[in-house]
Image (cartoon, grey):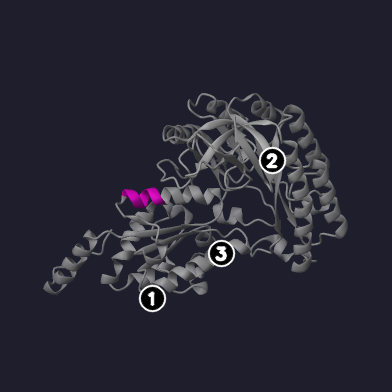
Amino acid sequence: MFPFFGGKSADFPIFLDFMERKKQKITVGFVSLGCPKNVVDSERMLAEIVQADFPITAETDNADVVVINTCGFIAPAEAESLEAIKHAVERKLSGAVKKVVVAGCLSERLGPKIHEKVEGIDAVVGLNQRDNIAKIIEKIFFSEICGHCEDCYPDQPLFPACDRVLDDRCRFLITPHHWAYLRISEGCNHCCSFCTIPAIRGRFRSKPMELVIAEAEELVSAGAVELNVIAQDTTSYGRDLKIKNGLNALLKEFERTAGLAWLRLMYLYPTGIDHGLIETIAESEKVVHYLDIPLQHMNDEILKAMRRPDKKDKLQRLIEDLRLAMPDIVLRTTMIVGFPGETDRQFQELLDFIRWAKFDALGCFKFYPESGTSAAELPNQISDEIKQQRLDELMLVQQEIAFAHNENRIGSKLTCLVDSVDSEGLAKGRFYGQAPDIDGVCIIKQCSAKPGKFIETRVIGTQGYDLLVEQI
């Protein structure tokens, strides 16, 4: 793992200096960017760093080594990642930081080309090298004694990549102790024309069911009462493992997980939601009636250009079926505006659908012509000005819908999971229809419970996307 020094007497002082420096504690500052899947990767890397006895410091501007777990999904995420990298390198040039390590999706997407965007990076760590992060930190930190690591390591993988789903057990949680993300698969086999994920995260791979359950039990035993199931394509779980109705089977296994109160399903590809899955969710004692189903658009021509297999009428029936089976269901979705060739008529059709569907929560993105995607090469690209206008108009429509949903909850009783409480008893929590770090929250006055506890509340008002509740 370390450079080998020969028997020359001139090498001996260098070797002693190397051994002395190895004894020192390498402080590590960690920056985690991006989606919940990146959070899980960050938590695994942090666990490896802590187990290697490297102190983690919150002062990333003055750490010996700064690790940046990047996002590279769309242009704004790439820009945010590059800005964080540039800042760390600037601190390195000032002498406050010694080494800069870049990990995550942007590393996977750009590889050695990332050095063309930012000079001064000491190591680029691909997704499959995640669990070797402590070894990589140790290697580059002491490499300057042999005088060549900064010249050759940045453009080469320090450890061989692999094509498998990684084991996410043993994590250093950066979420509150009472909730966590649970990843059940990696990668994606869909070929959406706008999406970079298959190129970054690879083909779809399900995590073995026994491993998923073992990880869930580990998280629950550590205090988690809520698990948020994530994947790039949750509804395809088990297909590659030849498990019939894989997600159904997995959800039924969770029913036996003692101590687990809420199981939340995120990122369900709509095509994979059938009546069997709907029935399983409706009958579950643990799966909350909240589904995150990214639809992306509602015009059939745009959906075809996006290479989505969905049709408007089928998606309408899906929403109707979900609400018929679970009248209290909370639905969240994601849309894209400004896709190449999107006409005013097609955009209006999307708005009309949103008014009809009345989603409880909705996220919207402007289309970005990402390099390597077929949509980036399509004709009739939309100007950024029109994209922004459409984004603003859509979100105003959704805001009116969301605020009306909140108003309709005034006077109702909700079971809330307390997330935080300040010194004056003002707390923030969530009912089942609010996903952590994504949706609004319940603001609780004079809360007597501690974080991680469930309390009964009554909605007494609203504050934008948040609910004002009182403990009862």
**Magenta-colored stretch includes residue 271:** no
Q: Which residues are magenta?
A: 46-51
Q: Quadrant of residue 142?
A: bottom left
Q: In the drawing, does residue 174 fall left or right of residue 304?
A: left
Which residue appears at 55% of the width and 55% of the height?
Answer: 34
Q: Residues within 10 Å of mark 2 (few under 14, many from 20)?
A: some
- Disc on the earlier residue, 3 or 2: 3
For the C terminus, the quadrant is: top right
**Magenta-colored stretch includes residue 50:** yes
**Horizontal and vertical percent position of residue 245:** 63, 30
Please name the amino acid that badge 1 sits on: Ser
Which residue appears at 64% of the width and 45% of the height?
Answer: 440
Q: Quadrant of residue 233?
A: top right
Q: Which mark is residue 94?
A: 1
Q: CA distance from mark 3 to mark 2?
A: 36 Å
Q: Which mark is residue 423?
A: none
- Secondary structure of the residue carrying numbered label 1: loop
- Disc on the earlier residue, 1 or 3: 3
**Horizontal and vertical percent position of residue 186:** 54, 46
According to the picture, the residue beneath numbered tag 2 turns out to be 461
